[in-house]
Amino acid sequence: MSPPHTVIDWERGARTGVPEVVFAQSKTVEQLRAIVEAHHERGRALLMTRLTAPQIAALADLPLDIDPLARTATLAAPEVPSGAPRLGIVTAGTSDLPVAREALHAARFLGLDAVLYEDLGVAGLWRLQDRLDEIAGFPLLIAVAGMEAALFSVLAGLVRAPVIAVPTSVGYGVSEGGKAALSSALASCAPGIVTVNIDNGFGAAAAARKFLPAPG
Amino acid sequence: MSPPHTVIDWERGARTGVPEVVFAQSKTVEQLRAIVEAHHERGRALLMTRLTAPQIAALADLPLDIDPLARTATLAAPEVPSGAPRLGIVTAGTSDLPVAREALHAARFLGLDAVLYEDLGVAGLWRLQDRLDEIAGFPLLIAVAGMEAALFSVLAGLVRAPVIAVPTSVGYGVSEGGKAALSSALASCAPGIVTVNIDNGFGAAAAARKFLPAPG
Amino acid sequence: MSPPHTVIDWERGARTGVPEVVFAQSKTVEQLRAIVEAHHERGRALLMTRLTAPQIAALADLPLDIDPLARTATLAAPEVPSGAPRLGIVTAGTSDLPVAREALHAARFLGLDAVLYEDLGVAGLWRLQDRLDEIAGFPLLIAVAGMEAALFSVLAGLVRAPVIAVPTSVGYGVSEGGKAALSSALASCAPGIVTVNIDNGFGAAAAARKFLPAPG
Amino acid sequence: MSPPHTVIDWERGARTGVPEVVFAQSKTVEQLRAIVEAHHERGRALLMTRLTAPQIAALADLPLDIDPLARTATLAAPEVPSGAPRLGIVTAGTSDLPVAREALHAARFLGLDAVLYEDLGVAGLWRLQDRLDEIAGFPLLIAVAGMEAALFSVLAGLVRAPVIAVPTSVGYGVSEGGKAALSSALASCAPGIVTVNIDNGFGAAAAARKFLPAPG
Amino acid sequence: MSPPHTVIDWERGARTGVPEVVFAQSKTVEQLRAIVEAHHERGRALLMTRLTAPQIAALADLPLDIDPLARTATLAAPEVPSGAPRLGIVTAGTSDLPVAREALHAARFLGLDAVLYEDLGVAGLWRLQDRLDEIAGFPLLIAVAGMEAALFSVLAGLVRAPVIAVPTSVGYGVSEGGKAALSSALASCAPGIVTVNIDNGFGAAAAARKFLPAPG
Amino acid sequence: MSPPHTVIDWERGARTGVPEVVFAQSKTVEQLRAIVEAHHERGRALLMTRLTAPQIAALADLPLDIDPLARTATLAAPEVPSGAPRLGIVTAGTSDLPVAREALHAARFLGLDAVLYEDLGVAGLWRLQDRLDEIAGFPLLIAVAGMEAALFSVLAGLVRAPVIAVPTSVGYGVSEGGKAALSSALASCAPGIVTVNIDNGFGAAAAARKFLPAPG
Amino acid sequence: MSPPHTVIDWERGARTGVPEVVFAQSKTVEQLRAIVEAHHERGRALLMTRLTAPQIAALADLPLDIDPLARTATLAAPEVPSGAPRLGIVTAGTSDLPVAREALHAARFLGLDAVLYEDLGVAGLWRLQDRLDEIAGFPLLIAVAGMEAALFSVLAGLVRAPVIAVPTSVGYGVSEGGKAALSSALASCAPGIVTVNIDNGFGAAAAARKFLPAPG
Amino acid sequence: MSPPHTVIDWERGARTGVPEVVFAQSKTVEQLRAIVEAHHERGRALLMTRLTAPQIAALADLPLDIDPLARTATLAAPEVPSGAPRLGIVTAGTSDLPVAREALHAARFLGLDAVLYEDLGVAGLWRLQDRLDEIAGFPLLIAVAGMEAALFSVLAGLVRAPVIAVPTSVGYGVSEGGKAALSSALASCAPGIVTVNIDNGFGAAAAARKFLPAPG
């Protein structure tokens, strides 16, 4: 039996508007190397998400731009085009940064002019209010929060833009694994919030790419 | 076999600081009538909670002060003493009123000078901010909220007083039954929030009675 | 104590882009009548959702446009403006119609040119494929499905538009209550899907209103 | 007390049609060696599933045919007889391969002419449609999928053969552990789908062996 | 807006081998009448499942063959052809009969020669053993059981035929809703068991129809 | 602050009939050494359960009788008295042995004449039936089973003795963690089964000690 | 097709020590009448549990001894023999009485000299302590409690007799349905507690019958 | 992109009455060092909670007062002022000590005169009763318990002071992760209990700080 391999869907970007992005976590190092090399040979850009620490160490010799906190790697990522749609990404706490930065890298890889605002959780509401004028200027916001994730409702109550909520698995006890944050997003009484899976920063960025008009 | 009956604990108030209050829902009308009559004969005050609509109808001839929305009834409730500790009760939405009013009646029955603030949910943050000066003046707050219950975190981030959260079973989908609101209370990143069971307005009032110094 | 009432937030539309819509289910008939009359007097449009059958019967004398299947009522709903953004709503089965029609009424009330496509579940994939050209022409799609809700992934894999998934509580056994459909939306491997709470047709429409550019 | 040991059921194949297969995960290396040696001495074929990486390393000196990805090992596996019943195994993604290959090895060990089709998830529906004519020719299909597992419903809607679904634990957030994929299999609106436990590739193969007529 | 209606998929039987069967529970009486009349006019056979008591009462004037216990109705059901594949249906307790009889009616409607064995739960293992010779003669068995559903494992350990398990929602406490019975089916250590959703008698029969060779 | 320590309850045996047994898992090695030494000095017998592998290694110099599979250690365990009550312990599979042997060691430590029967799961019902005469002779049985745990119901249906069920956490997918086995014990339709917590071999032995008459 | 019927297992008492008792809830009135009449004709005693209010009304003409609170009915129940084993049944609150009385009737039907102690929950620990000398004299105790069910641990810590815990579904919020009480029984740190399913008063009595020596 | 950092909220103590305390677990060692140094430079006191063993090792060179069992570290903690409010902390078992000591350190850091009582679980009720006079003298109690956590109800039934319950994740099977203990706190029938999240010793101390009057 020939060894397992990954079928790369080179035409996916053309077909659906979002190129295939590699979810690395459950792949072997051999599979990942093969994917990177295939893209490198063809001169294609590549984004990999959910790299584990051992995978990052094992791919260190490749020409990748790696963010260990976000657990992402990009190959030959294109510049964000001028005039690209703007996207604001807001996080509640330091612990939400890995997911928020996955969203940030993915959004830029997909051609959005994304900006990250850190540490604006509602335990200190003034921090959010201090930046509100700036944040309210984006046509679309991604909010990243764990624990009880009150940020989703508060933010959506303060701005006119729609909010894509990314619950994170940050927490312990009843909020362990992110179910509490997910419920807060889904059950919010503030209209205009939609949700993606727990820790799915890439998914939020991909949806944002589809919701915002293509540049030019 | 003799019929089932309820043992009334006449000394409980003296022993624990909170008189026995009757949880009516799972009792028969006969049991409730017997309890009311025993208190009436002895000239003792009585609070009953979680009365069902049929129970309320069946007890209509008794000298009870009934609030059908709160599903409570009191018999010979004492006046709130002057100089009694003050308690603020804040609700997120109209649907939380039954639970909030159960807390209100129970708090007054237990000798607290309680005030109810309605409809201050965070979907319209300005409503809460408009009343904030007044609300911030209480030494203790009870917050009542269902759905995603972001009110708990927002309120605790804005006031110095401790907050007793009462999650309510208001909601549908992921918030059905109140588990999402309960998780929001427990997982809140704002310190100073403690929680009671879903819909337990009485429990919040009883705890408030214990936390606040006795009058006089 | 004065009777409970509902504070109407007349300025909400101006502030957040989505006027306050009344979630009727947990309100009394008295509260609903008061709300309708207040809007009627001011000549304001009104949408009520989640009306129960007894509520619908009790409000029959009012000048409301009622859809019993959707459990919605509108008062003085404005015409959808010409040139309004277009929205496609796709349902998997007959049982999903109440939620889909709630989304339809809400979307039109909020000024979107919404069209409903019924009964396109993947058990008969040809039904979806027959309408695909038409459906693929919308800038935004709402998909409504219960049970295993495979429609979400299939649809998002076939079109370039983003998809707002509305899981429904249709089903029994493991799909009772809609958790299975919700998980299918959140766990979808097709990028570009975002989700709202189970049965939340209105929420999907409100989000769509925010994602789509205002007319004119 | 004598050391723990495993009672081998040599007659099980004759009695039930499926020989005893060893679930290795919770056994000690000593127990596994003893089992292999007992079979080797008697000239009996053996299949072991769910071997851990340390177990595989510790058994490297034995005459086993090991697939580390599938975590299986066979000893003296018989040739698949000519004219054996045909079985198609379809997987949604690369991450489902370990479970799919467990099913593949088990099916062949049990005398089925099994073929594996990789990476046919519905996010790219064209991949499945390209192979549909071939796949539709099998009298029985095993489908292996994690995350939201829309493959089960889509496949069952496209072919006349029955489908044994194997949900996998691939995923994160709401799909962590495979419950979402399992629900998709059980709640499918496409008739003709039956299910086995999460990650139970062997169980699907054993059932397939029983459903398909014995060769000859 | 025209009233909601149900699109009948007249070609489904030809396409997938299982004609469309109507799941009545979430349909209105008007929808059901329309479906029956459309089939009656065309001389087509029809099976409806999950009829509620009010639906059964409201359809009493139609030429349907109704089993109130099974909550099924058939219109012009064909005779089971001679030489049809044989199917054994085994139930654990009296309470499982509604689901077992839904499976029985569906199996016969789909052309199988199905026989029902009642009340063979393992609390009295002798009852099952007394009928074992007879039961072991079927090429395929459907087992219907609620509560702890030990019948699935015991039966599969005693016969060579494959077993399609139908967990039922019979039970209380930890077995309420059928999750415990479903887990027993999925976690069974006896190979050759596959499962359908809780209470899904029809689904088991439809799968059986696909697993068994067509008559003639 | 003085270091944490464990208060040993030397009189517990006299007071409740079951001496204090040490649950080792969440204790530090220092705490365990202190406990062993205190018992050694006083000449008291001691049983420790749930020892981790590092704890076992760290206590190797102490005069303990250790069973690494059961994760137990005893110090100066008394002989089982002649005429002690007899207890049968029955396990379903090899993987249940650690829990079954914890029960065995605990029962003997508490003065019961306990015998262990291995590998009698219902997937091979003949194995249980072969030993039935012997097993049926005990006045009390402990049954230890994971996965779907059909053994509990089958055993209780075959013997007159009461059965204490010990669900084990052996399994994967829906049976991971032992919840499915626990449900099977609680939902069993065979009367005379009682249950303890998942993996609680000691608890079953302690209850058996209380249910059986004291020797002499 | 002949009407559904119930197979009565007349020899069960002789075989297992516990005669078949009828779980009425999911049976039709016709089935129940037939069962009662068959027992009446043969002069056999009968116990039925979980009768619904409509069932009780429909069987009023039969010579049954009915306890509507316990939802039980007995036919020709034998006297408890003198010298029968003694059993104490302890309840936490008034709401637990239906389950406790089901246990009481079942225990007496099975030949035990059972006594019921009401309303001894730990919120008023003195009530339990006042009766402790009396309660501590029984060789076996059944404890019936809902909500947080602290009674199980407290009682088992105070007496030497084993305790069979019956969690009840009394409660709301996190204790709705009895899962919290069940967890308290299973997780108790007091050795000697075993558990049956939620609300399973009969099961506790049947187990008690098996644990206690037969009279005479 | 500049490295991630933590925004320190220096004014939080003044604003909310509880200074910002650092939840260390999800922060990098670099982030923690920066936080400690910033406080050291400004001469500010600091409390860090949930330090992991590697974090503790990596910060060993800093002038911190570390409790490895509690996983806390303090920098320049102020003396507890004389006349500070008194707080009693009661634990059920040795395994609850880490959480109880987190509460102890936090309470003292926040200016409370806190005392810890160890190992007073209800399995040996006499241990609690021996210390009851002393414990009953505190104006507020924190109770820390895992497993079934009967301590919460028993304690609240014996004292007049309010009780803040801290469920711990100590346990296995149904009590794994602390959900059973949390339910016991929430469902308690003893009035005057409020709860914080599982293992949240700091949260209980912070709430206690708010409930008790400020010294002087």
Image (cartoon, coloured by chain):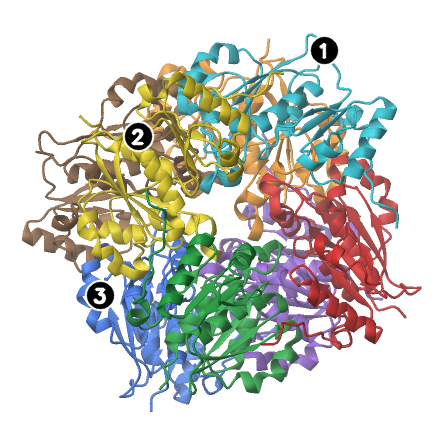
Chain colours: A brown, B cyan, C yellow, D blue, E green, F purple, G red, H orange
Task: Tell me, yes or no, whether dots 1 and 3 are on the same chain.
Answer: no
Name the quadrant of the C terminus of chain C.
top left
How many other residues sit within 10 Å of disc 2, few (<14), some (14-19) or many (≥20)? many
The relative height of residue E72 versus residue A108 in the rendered view (above or below) is below
Element assignment for label 3: loop
Residue G52 in sight: no
Judging from the image, mark 3 belongs to the subunit labelled A
From the top left corner, tell me how far across and down residue D3 is, in percent.
55, 73
In the image, G62: left or right of C45? right
Q: Which mark is residue A4?
A: 3
Element assignment for label 1: loop
Q: Nearer the viewer, mark 1 or mark 3?
A: 1
In the rendered structure, which amino acid carries the disc numbered 3? Pro
In the rendered structure, which amino acid carries the disc numbered 2? Leu
- Disc 1 designates what residue? B81
The relative height of residue A50 versus residue D26 in the rendered view (above or below) is above
Q: Separation of disc 1 and disc 2 at Cα?
A: 52 Å
